[in-house]
Image (cartoon, rainbow, N blue to C red):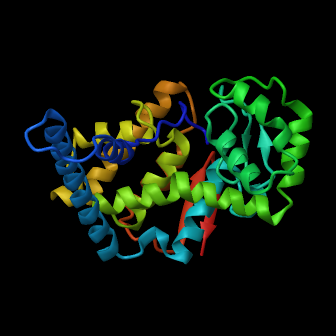
Amino acid sequence: MRRAGILLLAAVPVVVAAAVYATGPDRSGSPEGKHATASREAAGRAGSARDQDAEVIADAPPGLAAPAKKELAQQIVASAENSTLDWRTAYGYIEDIGDGQGYTAGIIGFCTGTHDLLTLVERYTGAHPDNGLATYLPALRKVDGSHSHEGLGPGFIAAWKAEAKLPAFRKAQDEERDRVYFDPAVRRAKLDGLGTLGQFIYYDAMVYHGPGAGPDSFNGLRERALKEADTPAEGGSEKNYLDIFLDVRRRAMRAKRPGVDTSRVDTAQRRFLYDGNLDLDTPLEWRVYKEPYRIP
């Protein structure tokens, strides 16, 4: 994932739950009882919000989560990440692209410097302890958060490519992509009232910038966009909101890396938006890094 920082996934529900169980039984009139009651009320409010969110998601059309649309999304992302529409050829991809994130690898651009590649290998090793990448876990933990290749190098590259030939590791990449990027992006977009194109715009932003809490992460970009426009869920114009979100994202990309190619925004997503293709219907035509792509 070509992005600016390490994942910092929110864990608010866990904290709330921990508070409930840590307070013990309610003792009327005691400070502990008051704290326990407050904690239960907070948990109840959080649970109510989650229930409401679940209803919104359940009532929304499948959107980008529909199989054909999801396939389309992987193709468009692959045009920017790997310069191909055949995204399944990228399981074994690995190289240092010089962006300060160490090695970029796999179908979504997992990076040795941004925690997601480490998490992928840890989870995969938990299910398949004898895999060829397991011996590199100490080195991956050491370089996490940096651009360093220390302890990795040609051996790690060869091990990644060999493991990527196995169905189990391909499945692990698919699952981690969905768990960290695709599913959260689609969920957040549906809660914001966005259609299929908006869901894809969120997904691509999450892939590139990461789903963390920092100012240049997906959530930071969304917060900045919300200061300039209302989401459709808030009564705003979908096209206007997405246009502003893309403006915010483009500025963030250029601020991080002056001169970076922003065509995945300018001549792909913005083109779909200005064509009024909010459902991301085919045929689609776009350009990334000056290369033309078409899906009939």
Quarter occupied by residue 27: top left
Instruction: Give the position of the N terminus as an image quadrant.
Output: top right
Q: Is residue 248 left or right of residue 99?
A: left
Count of residue discs:
0
Residue lying at 74% horizontally and 23% vertically, measured from the top left: 148
Asked whether residue 247 appears in the rendered view, the answer is no
Residue lying at 60% horizontally and 62% vertically, measured from the top left: 74
Q: Is residue 131 left or right of residue 44?
A: right
- Residue in the foreground of this view, choosing between 37 and 247: 37
Could you say where residue 21 lies in the image, as x and y percent from the top left? Answer: 33, 46
Could you say where residue 55 lies in the image, as x and y percent from the top left? Answer: 27, 71
- Residue in the foreground of this view, choosing between 192 and 258: 192
Instruction: Give the position of the C terminus as an image quadrant.
Output: bottom right
Vertical arrangement, residue 199 with respect to residue 59, above or below? above
Residue lying at 55% horizontally and 26% vertically, measured from the top left: 257
Vertical arrangement, residue 293 with respect to residue 111, above or below? below
Could you say where residue 209 lies in the image, as x and y percent from the top left? Answer: 51, 39
- Residue in the foreground of this view, choosing between 275 and 114: 114
Q: Is residue 229 left or right of residue 146?
A: left
Asked whether residue 4 appears in the rendered view, the answer is yes
Could you say where residue 180 lies in the image, as x and y percent from the top left? Answer: 53, 51
Q: Is residue 50 left or right of residue 94?
A: left
